[in-house]
Amino acid sequence: MTSAPIVVHRPSTSGGQRVTVRRGGRDEFLGTAYSDHDLVVFLEGAGVADPEAILDDPQWVEWRGGHAHEFHAA
């Protein structure tokens, strides 16, 4: 099984979570999200159609090191 193409990484000590997308066999950094809104904007910019609909789909998005939709500092 392959991992989800979008990864929301563990929260940083200063807050926010790095967001990467796997394209062409490599991970591309999209930005640091501080909210679901930030995440949706990054995914729209990466060409994901209707990103709000996939945020809770583990086939698309893997939330690492914390609970989904929680962007507080570690």
Image: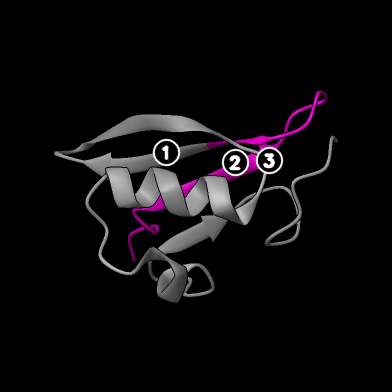
Q: Is residue 13 above or below residue 71?
A: above
Which amino acid is tagged 1? Answer: Thr
The secondary element bearing badge 3 is classed as: strand
The secondary element bearing badge 2 is classed as: strand
Q: Are marks 3 and 2 in contact (CB under 8 Å)?
A: yes
From the viewer's side, name the closer residue of 48 and 64.
48
Which amino acid is tagged 3? Answer: Arg
Q: Residue at x 54, y 73 (%)?
A: 56
Q: Is residue 56 above or below residue 11?
A: below
Q: Residue at x 32, y 31 (%)?
A: 28
Q: Which portion, as a residue range, is magenta? A: 1-18
- Horizontal and vertical percent for residue 52? 46, 69
Q: Quadrant of residue 24?
A: top left
Crowd rating for badge 1 (residues with CA inside 10 Å; few <14, some 14–19, many 20+): many
Q: Of the numbered discs in the image, which one, if any, rests on residue 10?
A: 3
Q: Is residue 24 above or below residue 47?
A: above
Q: Disc 1 designates what residue?
A: 20
Say whether residue 10 is magenta.
yes
- Horizontal and vertical percent for residue 6? 40, 51
Q: Of the numbered discs in the image, which one, if any, rests on residue 9?
A: 2
Q: Is residue 2 above or below residue 58?
A: above
- For marks 3 and 2, give the CA distance: 4 Å
Mark 1 vs 2, N-terminal side: 2
Q: Where, quadrant-wise, is the N terminus in this rendering?
A: bottom left
Which amino acid is tagged 2? Answer: His
The answer to whether residue 6 is left or right of residue 25 is: right
- For marks 3 and 1, give the CA distance: 12 Å
- Horizontal and vertical percent for residue 58? 48, 71
- Horizontal and vertical percent for residue 42? 41, 43
Crowd rating for badge 2 (residues with CA inside 10 Å; few <14, some 14–19, many 20+): some
The answer to whether residue 57 is left or right of residue 25 is: right
